[in-house]
Amino acid sequence: MATTRDYTAEDCSLARSLEIVGERWTLLIVRDAFYGVQRFADFAAHLRIPRAILSERLSLLVRSGVLTKSPGPGRRELYRLTDKGIELFPVLRTLVAWGDKHYAPRGPRRHFRHADDNGEVNLAGVCQDCGKSLAVRDYLVTTGPGAAPLDTDADVVTRALAHPHRLLDPITG
């Protein structure tokens, strides 16, 4: 028996949320949007996702109000997180921390720091140095001990993330 993807008639908030973000690639796309990825080609190259799946997931995220799509340079379109999408950050941050604890034997691939003072940020979003509760734009993502060495033919996103980068700042080629 085939399973359904449509939970619109369900009263369960988790089931309805999973309808939007529960498929394999979706949270990785959202994660990359937090990193500042905005162009289809950059999502495709960094995630190594089939273009048809990426197109479907981006369309779903736009229809659901998690991302917005706007004209970019040339014929390109840019995808940006909406306020609704930005509200997913604690979910992503917690999943990353859980994965770092259980599946990162060399340590975290990325660290989250306070852009103003480089202090470590805890899971509650508080800078451990200054005590400030941070908005997503106040985060700096840096490499951690689990990051792979930078390959000379790495995609534009991987190259950008090899250096400290403020969340939500656009990554451009």
Image: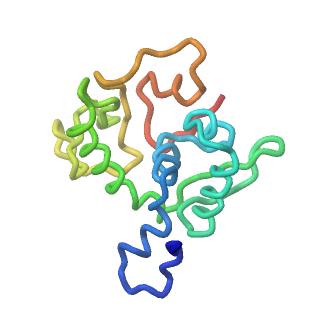
Q: Left or right: where does residue 2 sit relative to residue 120?
A: right
Q: In this view, does 67 lie above or below 141?
A: below
**Picture residue at 50% right of the left edge, 66% below the top:** 20
Q: Farthest right residue? A: 74
Residue 61 image-quadrant placement? bottom right
**Picture residue at 23% right of the left edge, 33% below the top:** 119
Residue nearest the observer in this picture, 51 or 123: 51
Q: Left or right: where does residue 5 sit relative to residue 88?
A: right
Q: Left or right: where does residue 15 sit relative to residue 121?
A: right
Residue nearest the observer in this picture, 172 or 150: 150
**Picture residue at 33% right of the left edge, 56% below the top:** 91
Residue 167 image-quadrant placement? top left
Where is residue 13 drawn, in percent x and y? 37, 77
**Picture residue at 83% right of the left edge, 45% below the top:** 75
Where is residue 69 drawn, in percent x and y? 67, 57
Q: Which quadrant would the C terminus be assigned to in this image?
A: top right
Residue nearest the observer in this picture, 36 or 30: 30
Where is residue 40 drawn, in percent x and y? 67, 44
Q: In this view, does 18 lie above or below 118?
A: below
Q: Is residue 19 above or below residue 163?
A: below
How many numbered marks, from 0 up?
0
Where is residue 22 drawn, in percent x and y? 44, 61
Q: Left or right: where does residue 67 sit relative to residue 121?
A: right
